[in-house]
Amino acid sequence: MKKWQRRIRPWLINHLSLPPDVMLELPRITIIGDIHIYVENHRGLLTFTNTELQLKSANGAIQIIGSSFVMKTMLPKEILLEGKILEVKFIMDA
């Protein structure tokens, strides 16, 4: 990220009352029990099987492990996944 962006984004968040997840390009993940997961603000699909979903994010990847996965909704920046969710991991870029 450019040097000026690192300085101005925190200022914008504090002074304009903007949500940090939007300004910092962070994913927003909503989990309902262990059967639904809704991911907003991702950057694309890396892997999808019936036991694993990996999505690109601003800082690396989001990995969701489980079973019987069915993708209910897939939009450019949003995914709704249904199945048995066992684990959610953030894999940071080195």
Image (spheres, helix red, strand yellow):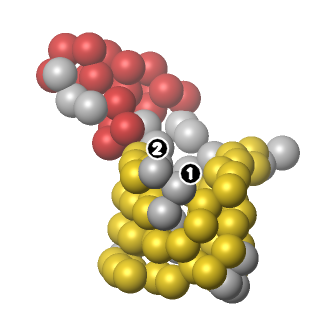
Would you call the spot at circle 2 few (<14 residues within 10 Å), some (14-19), or many (20 or more)?
A: some
Give the amino acid at mark 1. Ala
Is residue 77 at all visible to an observer of this figure? no
Q: Report the residue at 71% width, 64% height from top.
A: 65
Classify residue 62 as left or right of residue 34.
Answer: right
Classify residue 11 as left or right of residue 5.
Answer: left
Depth order, front residue of 93/78: 78
Identify the residue position indicated by label 2 in the image.
Answer: 26
Q: Image height check: is 57 above or below 92? A: below
Q: Image height check: is 64 above or below 46? A: above
Depth order, front residue of 67/76: 67
Q: Image height check: is 80 above or below 94? A: below
Q: Position of residue 48 (x, y in %)?
A: 65, 82
Classify residue 82 as left or right of residue 76.
Answer: right
Using the rendered view, name the quadrant where residue 61 is placed. bottom right
Count of marks, rendered view: 2
Q: Position of residue 66 (x, y in %)?
A: 69, 67
| Marks 2/1: CA–CA distance | 7 Å
Give the amino acid at mark 2. Leu
Q: Position of residue 54 (x, y in %)?
A: 66, 68
Q: Report the residue at 35% width, 30% height from top.
A: 20
Residue 58's disc is 1
Using the rendered view, name the quadrant where residue 1 is placed. top right
Badge 2 or badge 1: first in the primary sequence: 2
Q: Are marks 2 and 1 in contact (CB under 8 Å)?
A: yes
Classify residue 57 as left or right of residue 9.
Answer: right
Q: Image height check: is 81 above or below 28? A: below
